[in-house]
Image: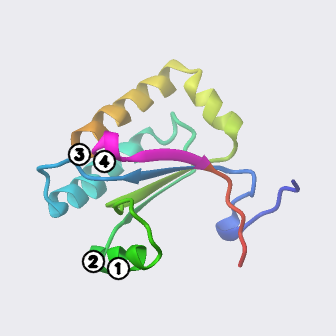
Amino acid sequence: MKSTTGRRGYSDDMLKMVFCVRKKQGISAEEFYDYWLNSHGPLVASHAASMNIKHYVQSHTIDGEFGRMISAARGMKVPGFDGIAEIWWDSRQDLDLVLQTEEGQSSSAILAEDEARFIDMENSTIFFTNEHNVF
């Protein structure tokens, strides 16, 4: 596939990790979103260079009732997520290089340990994508 420059100047070859998250039981939505944005977000930023991260976005779910209504109308049975985190690397090779360095492995472990404080890992999911800009 031909590499082009897509939206925001990102290459179509970029690798994106999508992390669909659910908050841990016993944590209020307010506590969850506050910690994710104001504690975990800066922690990710502090490790971005050692992990070759080019872009990080958090999407916090709003109006859960409306989302449940739309899901039900489509016959969806899986409960919605509390949010999505997206992390971009220039390429799969850039991510692979991170995992081969001691600093990258250490940063990854620090972030995973922090995520376990507020994210219900058993009911969340991660997958990797390449974007295809339609319009």
Q: The residue under label 2 is which amino acid type?
A: Glu
Residue where numbered disc 2 is placed: 65
Residue where numbered disc 4 is placed: 40
Residue where numbered disc 1 is placed: 69
Question: Contact (CB < 8 A) between labels 3 and 4?
Answer: yes
Q: Residue at x 82, y 61 (%)?
A: 4
Q: The residue under label 3 is which amino acid type?
A: Phe
Q: The residue under label 4 is which amino acid type?
A: His
Question: Contact (CB < 8 A) between labels 1 and 2?
Answer: yes
Q: Residue at x 33, y 46 (%)?
A: 123
Rendering coords of residue 120 (x, y %): 28, 44
Of labels 1 and 3, the one closer to you? 1
Residue where numbered disc 3 is placed: 118
Q: Is residue 135 magenta?
A: no
Judged from the image, the secondary structure of the residue bearing numbered disc 1 is helix
Q: CA distance from mark 4 to mark 2?
A: 26 Å
Report the residue that reaches farthest toward the right.
2
Rendering coords of residue 83 (x, y %): 36, 60
Q: CA distance from mark 3 to mark 2?
A: 22 Å
Judged from the image, the secondary structure of the residue bearing numbered disc 2 is helix
